[in-house]
Image (cartoon, rainbow, N blue to C red):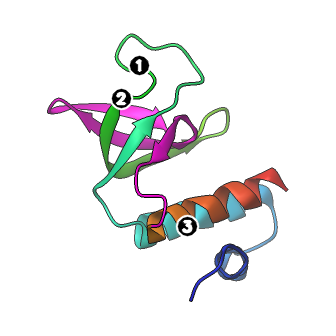
């Protein structure tokens, strides 16, 4: 069974170097490959937006890109419209999913 530590080690092993940018690129590849889309999440805003409120339930359909200031930007659907929201501003509704474990591993790596 995968653990947070084993996922972090796998991503680091796949990276070209230990430079943060290279590891972030590998995290992008890993998340794109391993996350099972779509999945449901609850909005937990840090920044202000007119579109979302805390507690909104959204469907995450893909990863769009990585922006230094915001981290991973996810492509999401709300009421059949497409938006883009930082992964940091959402929580998965299924806390026991493989997706949750993978995302927890990323945030654990990012904190160190």
For residue 110, above or below residue 81: below
Do the residues bearing badges 2 and 1 touch, measured as CB atoms within 8 Å?
yes
Given this view, does label 1 or label 3 mark the residue nearer the observer? 1
In the image, what residue occupies the spot 44% across and 67% down? 97
Q: At 85% from the left edge and 56% from the top edge, which residue is drawn?
A: 112
Q: Which residue lies furthest to the right in this view?
A: 112
Instruction: Kindly identify which residue carries mark 2.
Output: 56
Which quadrant would the N terminus be assigned to in this image?
bottom right
Q: How crowded is mark 1: few (under 14 residues within 10 Å), some or many (20 or more)?
A: few
Cα distance in 3D space between marks 2 and 3: 22 Å
Start-end of magenta stretch: 73-96
User: Residue 41, percent across and down?
Assistant: 39, 44
Tell me where residue 14 appears, x and y as whole percent. 65, 80
Disc 3 designates what residue? 102
Q: Could you say whether the residue bearing mark 2 is in a helix, strand or loop?
A: loop
Tell me the quarter of the picture where residue 47 sits.
top right
The answer to whether residue 31 is seen in the rendering is yes
Residue appearing at x 81%, y 69% in the figure: 18
Inter-mark Cα distance, 2 to 1:
6 Å
> Is most of the magenta stretch helix, strand or loop?
strand
* CA separation in Å, label 1 and label 3: 25 Å
Q: Name the residue under label 1.
A: 53
**Is 108 drawn above or below residue 69 in the view shown?**
below
In the image: residue 73, left or right of residue 61: right
Q: How crowded is mark 3: few (under 14 residues within 10 Å), some or many (20 or more)?
A: many
Residue under the point 55% across and 67% down = 102
User: Residue 21: which quarter of the image?
Assistant: bottom right
In the displayed image of the protein, which residue is found farthest to the bottom?
1
Residue 66 in picture, x, y percent from top left:
55, 45
Pick the front one: 48 or 57: 57
């Amino acid at each position: 069974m995968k653990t947070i530590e084993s996922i972090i080690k796998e991503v680091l092993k796949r990276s070209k170097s230990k430079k943060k940018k290279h590891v972030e690129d590998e995290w992008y590849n890993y998340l794109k490959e391993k996350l099972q889309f779509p999945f449901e999440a609850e909005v937990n805003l840090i920044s202000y937006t007119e579109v979302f409120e805390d507690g909104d339930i959204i469907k995450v359909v893909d990863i769009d890109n990585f922006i230094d200031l915001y981290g991973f930007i996810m492509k999401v659907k709300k009421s059949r419209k497409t938006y883009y929201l930082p992964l940091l501003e959402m929580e998965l509704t299924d806390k026991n999913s493989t997706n949750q474990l993978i995302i927890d591993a990323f945030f654990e790596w990012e904190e160190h």
